Image (spheres, rainbow, N blue to C red):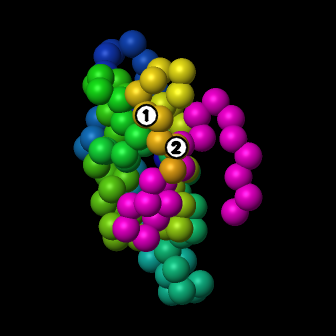
C-alpha cells in the first residue's frame, strides 16, 4: 500500500489516515476471500510508510499509519515490509520488530529478504 502520510499539499503521493483506511477497507473483501480459499488472509503486506509507532520518525512526514496496525491486528500477515524510513535519517536504528504475529521489516534503500 503505497504513499506516505499527507504532510503538505505538494504531492499527490500522500494520504491522510482516513484515505489509507479507505484503501484498506477496499482491500478487505479480497482478503476475506483469501481466508476462505487458502486459510489465511495474506502472508506479506508491502507498504511504503511504516505502521504507527514502529520504525517511525519524529516528524509528521515520517509518522506511520494506524491503519497498518489495524491490518496487522485483524489480518495477521506474517510480514509487513515497508520503506520510507532510511537509516541515514537516523530515526530508527532497529530494522526488524515483532508486532503480535507480524514481523515488521524496514527495507528502505535496499535489502535482500529470503522469505
Q: Nearer the viewer, residue 43 or 13?
A: 43
Instruction: Report whether 62 appears left or right of 87.
Output: left
Q: Secondary structure at mark 2?
A: loop
The residue where tag 2 is placed is 95
Q: Which residue is located at x 69 percent, y 63 percent?
A: 115
Badges 1 and 2: C-beta atoms under 8 Å apart? yes
The circle on residue 26 is none
Magenta stretch in the rendered image: 97-115
Can residue 29 be seen from the camera position used here?
A: no
Q: Which residue is located at x 31 percent, y 60 percent?
A: 70
Q: Position of residue 40 (x, y in %)?
A: 52, 80
Q: Which residue is located at x 51 percent, y 50 percent?
A: 96
Q: Nearer the viewer, residue 106 or 44?
A: 106
Hey, which quadrant is residue 74 in on the image?
A: bottom left
Q: Position of residue 88 (x, y in %)?
A: 54, 21
The circle on residue 92 is 1
Hey, which quadrant is residue 64 in on the image?
A: top left
**Circle 1 Cα neighbour tier, 10 Å, few/some/many (<14 / 14–19 / ≥20):** some
55 drawn magenta: no
Q: Which residue is located at x 37 percent, y 46 percent?
A: 54
**Circle 2 Cα neighbour tier, 10 Å, few/some/many (<14 / 14–19 / ≥20):** some
Q: Secondary structure at mark 1?
A: loop
Instruction: Report whether 113 appears left or right of 57.
Output: right
Q: Position of residue 69 (x, y in %)?
A: 33, 56
Amino acid at each position: 500500500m503505497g504513499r506516505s502520510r499527507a504532510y503538505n499539499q505538494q504531492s499527490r503521493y500522500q494520504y491522510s489516515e482516513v484515505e489509507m483506511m479507505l484503501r484498506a477497507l477496499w482491500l478487505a473483501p479480497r482478503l476475506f476471500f483469501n481466508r476462505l480459499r487458502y486459510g489465511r488472509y495474506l502472508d506479506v503486506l508491502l507498504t511504503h510508510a511504516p505502521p504507527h509507532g514502529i520504525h517511525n520518525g519524529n516528524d509528521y512526514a515520517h509518522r506511520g499509519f494506524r491503519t497498518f496496525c489495524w491490518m496487522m491486528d485483524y489480518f495477521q500477515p506474517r510480514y509487513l515490509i515497508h520503506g520510507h524510513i532510511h537509516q541515514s535519517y537516523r530515526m530508527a536504528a532497529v530494522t526488524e520488530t515483532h508486532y503480535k504475529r507480524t514481523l515488521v521489516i524496514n527495507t528502505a534503500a535496499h535489502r535482500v529478504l529470503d522469505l
